[in-house]
Each structure stands twice: as C-alpha cells, then as structure tokens.
Image: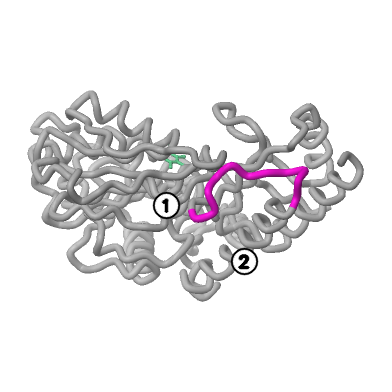
Amino acid sequence: MNIFNFSAGPASLPKEVLLKAQAELIDWNGQGTSVMEVSHRGKPFIELAEKSEADLRRIMSIPDNYKVLFLQGGGRGQFFSVPLNLYKRGKRSQHLVSGQWSKGAVVEAQKYMACDVIGENFTVANLINVTRPEASQIDSSAAYFHYCTNETVDGIEINWLPETGDVPLVADMSSNILSKQLDVSKFGIIYAGAQKNIGPSGLALVIIRDDLLDFARDDTPSTFHYATQAKKDSMYNTPPTFSWYLASLVFDWIEEKGGLAQIEKINQEKAKRLYSFINNSDFYSNRIAPQYQSKMNVTFYLADEALNQAFLTQSNDAGLHALKGHRDVGGMRASIYNAMPLEGVDALIEFMSEFERVNG
Ligand SMILES: *Cc1c(COP(=O)(O)O)cnc(C)c1O
C-alpha cells in the first residue's frame, strides 16, 4: 500500500531524496564513511556547503547583497535571534499576528523589544481574514516588522507584502519557503525552520540583507549572532551536518523538478483540487477566507465532529497518515508541502469522498 504522510512537521521528504541518502549512507562521496562522520571543516563537506548555498541562491534568485546562513535552533530559535540581532536598530518591533506562529514570535520578542501588534485576524461570515496593516501604522523608528507568511497551525497563507517603507520586513517562512517564486529583495530577513519544505529538523535557514548585520546587542550569543555566523560561513559552531546534507539533496530535487516555477504550479494544482472538493461539500468545511487558504496546510472540519475519530482511524488504515488538526484549532489538517505528490492529494480526496458517501 502507498503511504501518504500529511504530517505538518517534521514532514515528508521526497522519496528520491531518501533513496539517494540511503544509497550514500555508509559511503558518502567516496569517503568510505557517512557524511555524518566527517569534519565540517574538511574539503568534502565545505564543497557540499558551498554547492548547497549556490544552488539555493539560484533556486530562490537571492541577490548578492544577502547572506545565507545555515544555523541551528529551528524556527523558534529565530524568534529570539531576530530581536537580538536587530536590537540596535530600535528596541521596538512591529508585528502582524495572523495565527499561532506569529503570536509565538511576539512572546519571544517581548523579552527584548517593546512589541507593537498592528494587525490581527477578523472573521466575516464565519471566515477568517487577516488585517492588512496600513502604511500609516508603520513606525519608522521600529527595528523591524515581523510577520509569518504561512500559519502552519491555522492554515492561513498571506500572499500580499506588508508595505513597511524603510522598516526591514522580517518573515517567518518556515512552512512555505521554496513552495513558490518569491522576490527576496523585498525582505530584510527571511527565516525558516527546515522540517517542512527544506529537509529534516535541526536546521534553520536565515537569509539576511547585508546592511542588517551591524545591529546586534553586544550580549548576543555568538552561535546566534548573524554577523559572526556570516563571517564564519555558518561554521562558528558545528553545523547540523546531516540536516544540511539532506537539504542539499532537496535543493537538487527542486532543480530536477524544474525549479520553483514548476514546484509552484504543482502546489497550486494540489491545493485547487483539495479546496474545490472541500468547498463543494456540505460534509466538510474550511474556515479561512478563500484568498488566505494556505496552499501548504489545508485545515478542514467535518460537519459532524462526532465522526472525527472514525475519520482519523479509517484514513490512517487507508495509508493517509497524520491528518489530525493541531490541538489548538481541532478538526483536520492535510499538510501538502512540496514532497506531497499530486497522487497523495487525489488519494485523500477519494477517501474523503467515500467517507462522506458512507457517513453523510
Ligand atoms: C514549525 C514552525 C516553526 C517552529 O519551528 P521549530 O523548528 O519547531 O522551532 C516556526 N514557525 C512556523 C511558521 C512553523 O511552521
């Protein structure tokens, strides 16, 4: 039986990537050892690091005036690293809170910054919308403006760019980075924990504009000090080498697929199929306004929630794993990141349709 894993994170990795890693596991790069067992300062690993950065720069069209860092600490590690590293720009940060993760970023930032929440969600006709901050709300003395482009828990994706003038735009893209084309030059800092669309957990990617490297608090720990890590090519401390290696295989896979233009097309098609099925059904519903429905995390509810357990048990038995929604929002969630093939989405729709036929 084909297994399709809809886990929100850590999430599925492309089969081709896992097979390549399996084939190279005990003899990587002709070394006679695995990639996990060699020095990060040796030539083979340095070459891997350099190639992966060059690949990512090409895939995302990252301009030359941005540094790319491969760090530890995951997504949440950046919740405190961002305020520490931008502290000398202003001691005040502005935030859009569109769901659980952007709220979590405020909780951490508040330890260092005066945080100003200038937009939250609102509900119209039972559908969740996101407030779009007005240019007049931006405080030009703020160190940065933070938002989350895709709320993994809630299933909310923001497709517009907040207009923040000279205030650097900082985006948590943990769950939709590499899912579509993006103009990196609009951002001051983009960061992402790896375990959704990049690779396994243990790695965080930070893409930062050069001019923002000079504002860290003096007491910022060196491991999380962007300028130190930039100077040391992300090797001030030992990087998570195996995660980095797997990320490099994922980058190869993205290029083999035709890059982000092609990946984006497939992601659009997957989301379109699943949302149109849900929207055309009275048995299932999604509670997000159409323009904010996430293409990565599709949240939905059964009209009769007494059937939730049966839905989860039977879907799991059918090889469709990890569909339970996050405990904070309930219901169901199908995470359909890059590694989820179209066939997985079709199999889910077929199951949902049959479940509705039997129980509706
Ligand atoms: C998963 C996730 C995080 C947290 O990542 P950790 O690696 O667990 O710290 C942060 N933000 C978003 C949007 C996420 O999806």
From which residue to which does the magenta span run?
281-291
Percent x, y of residue 351: 82, 50
Position of residue 208 relative to residue 58, above or below, is: above
Label 2 to label 1, Cα distance in Å?
18 Å
Tag 1 or tag 2, which sits nearer the N-term? 1
Q: Secondary structure at mark 2?
A: helix
Q: Main SS type for the magenta part?
A: loop
- Label 2 beta carbon less than 8 Å to ligand 1: no
Give the side of residue 277 with respect to residue 98, left or right: right
> Disc 2 residue type?
Glu
Percent x, y of residue 16: 62, 63
Give the side of residue 63 with respect to residue 352, left or right: left
Percent x, y of residue 339: 59, 57
Q: Is residue 88 visible?
A: yes
Disc 1: which residue:
158
Residue 50 location, quadrant? bottom left
- Residue sitting at the far top: 111
Q: Residues within 10 Å of mark 2 (few under 14, many from 20)?
A: few
Percent x, y of residue 187: 25, 56
Q: Is residue 176 magenta?
A: no
Disc 2: which residue:
269
